[in-house]
Amino acid sequence: MQRQPMNQAQRRILVFSLLIIILLAVLYFLFFSDGGLIAPKASPEPSATFLTVEEARDTLPTPTPTPSPTPSPTPPPTATPAPTDTPVPEKVVSLKKGSKGTDVVNLQARLIELGYMKTGSNDGNYGSGTEAAVKEFQAKNNLKTDGIAGKDTLTKLYSSDAIPK
C-alpha cells in the first residue's frame, strides 16, 4: 500500500500542532523549571564543611587497583571471498498501453508522486490516462515523447533528478 502525500489542509494541521507543542514546552520551562519566573526553592544548608584541604583529603576513599583481564587469543582472520558483480538485466521491460501488474502500479505511484497523475489512480492497468501522464513526463524531462515507459523513461522517472509537474 502506497503512502499518500499530504494535502495542504493536513500540512496546516501538522504545522499548527507542532506550534502548539512548542508553545506548551516554552510555557512549561518558563513557569515550572528552576530558571523560570516562579521563585526557585531555597536550597538546604550544607550539613558539614571541611576546615582544611587535608581534612577533605582524609575522607576520600583509597583507590584499590582492579586486576586487568587476561586477553584471550584472537583467532586468525579468515579469507573473505571477493564480491561478485550483480548481473545487469540484458533487457528492460517496456511498459505501454495494455500492460498490467505491479510494475505498472509502481510506475503509476511514481507518476502520482511527481504530480502527473491524480492520487488513487494507480490501478495497475496501463490505460490512456497512464499513457498521457507518461507522455507529459517525457516531454517535461526532454525524453522521446511516445507514451511508452522504456529504459530511458524508467531510469529518469525513478531518479532523484526527475522533474515534477
Image (cartoon, rainbow, N blue to C red):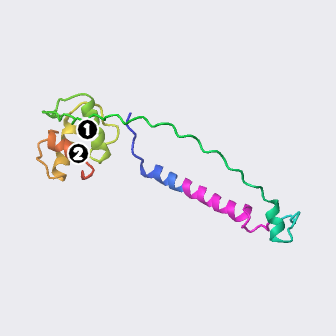
Mark 2 burial class by Cα count in 10 Å: few <14, some 14-19, many 20+? many
Picture coordinates of residue 15 (x, y %)?
51, 55
Query: Which residue corresponds to the image point at 55% horizontal and 55% vertical from the top-left?
Result: 18
Q: Is residue 165 left or right of residue 153?
A: right
**Number of marks drawn:** 2
Marks 1/2: CA–CA distance? 8 Å
**Which secondary structure lies at badge 1?**
helix
Q: Amino acid at mark 1?
A: Leu
Instruction: Determine if residue 67 is in view.
Output: yes
Above or below 58: residue 17: above
First in residue order: circle 1 vs circle 2: 1
Q: What residue do we see at 29% from left, 42% from top?
A: 110
State which quadrant residue 55 falls in. bottom right
Magenta segment includes 104: no
Per the image, is 35 magenta?
yes
Q: Residue at x 23, y 35 (%)?
A: 84
Tell me residue 103's x, y (percent): 25, 32
Residue 157 falls in image quadrant = top left
Q: Which of the image's four quarters has the N terminus?
A: top left
Tell me the residue at 17%/35% (across/down). Answer: 88
Q: Which residue is mark 1?
A: 107
- Residue 117 visible here: no
User: Do the numbered discs 1 and 2 sit on residues whose CB atoms are within 8 Å?
Assistant: yes
Q: Main secondary structure of the magenta part?
A: helix
Q: Position of residue 37 (x, y in %)?
A: 74, 69
| Mark 2, residue position | 157
Is residue 103 left or right of 38 when viewed as pictured? left
Range drawn in magenta: 17-42
Q: Callout 2: helix, strand or loop?
A: helix
* Above or below 55: residue 117: above
- Which is more toward the observer, 54 or 102? 54
